[in-house]
Amino acid sequence: MQANRLTEKHSVSGQIEPSDVEAIKAAGFTAIICNRPDGEAPGQSTIAEVAAAAEAAGIAFHANPMVGGTLPGEIVEKQGEILRSADAPVFAYCASGRRSTALWLLSNPDQLDADERLRRAQEAGYDLEMLRPQL
């Protein structure tokens, strides 16, 4: 599990396993957001499995799954609400971190301008320039 930092308060990664939760906690994260629906890939840990590990570790867990290639407004809005209200820092994951980054970019919990958000996404390894018109 490698966290790609977007800001001091928000990091993203690809799929995590329940066994990764202790390392996430040790890295100082206080909340985990799952942006990946169950069953996308064979052998993928379920939301319930990761949530149980987070609960056992004393880390807040939020499920906000999004199907790849879509950006439903209600999911963007919910992501922003979670990011703004969670005790930071927050660790969000999906298959690769790209969806979680797009949700951060669009929900803009840090009130950054579009260029800064796109730059931070790029530095984290996610080219999301195609979302510029939506910013």
Image (spheres, rainbow, N blue to C red):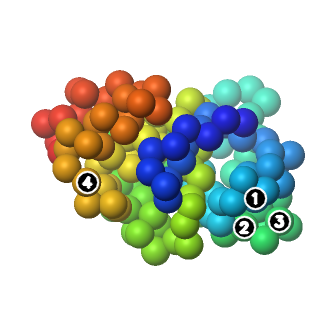
- Does 36 appear above or below 107? above
Q: Which mark is residue 112?
A: 4
Image-based side of 108 in relation to 83, left or right? left
Amino acid at pointer 1: Lys
Which residue in the protein does label 3 denote? 57
- Give the CA separation, mark 2 to mark 4: 27 Å
Q: Which of marks 2 and 4 is nearer the N terminus?
A: 2
Q: What element carries label 1?
A: helix
- Does 51 appear above or below 130? below
Q: Pick the residue in front: 38 or 17.
A: 17
Contact, mark 2 vs mark 3 (Cβ under 8 Å): yes
Q: Earlier in the sequence, mark 4 or mark 1?
A: 1
User: On the image, which quarter does residue 111 sit in?
Assistant: bottom left
Residue plotted at (47% across, 33% down) = 124
Residue plotted at (74% across, 26% down) = 42
Q: Residue furthest left?
A: 133
Q: In which quarter of the image is the N terminus?
A: top right
Q: Earlier in the sequence, mark 2 or mark 1?
A: 1
Amino acid at pointer 2: Ile
- Give the CA separation, mark 2 to mark 3: 6 Å
Image-based side of 76 in relation to 36, left or right? left
Residue plotted at (41% across, 69% down) = 84
Which residue in the protein does label 1 denote? 25
Amino acid at pointer 3: Ala
- Give the CA separation, mark 4 to mark 1: 27 Å
Q: Which mark is residue 67?
A: none
Contact, mark 4 vs mark 1 (Cβ under 8 Å): no
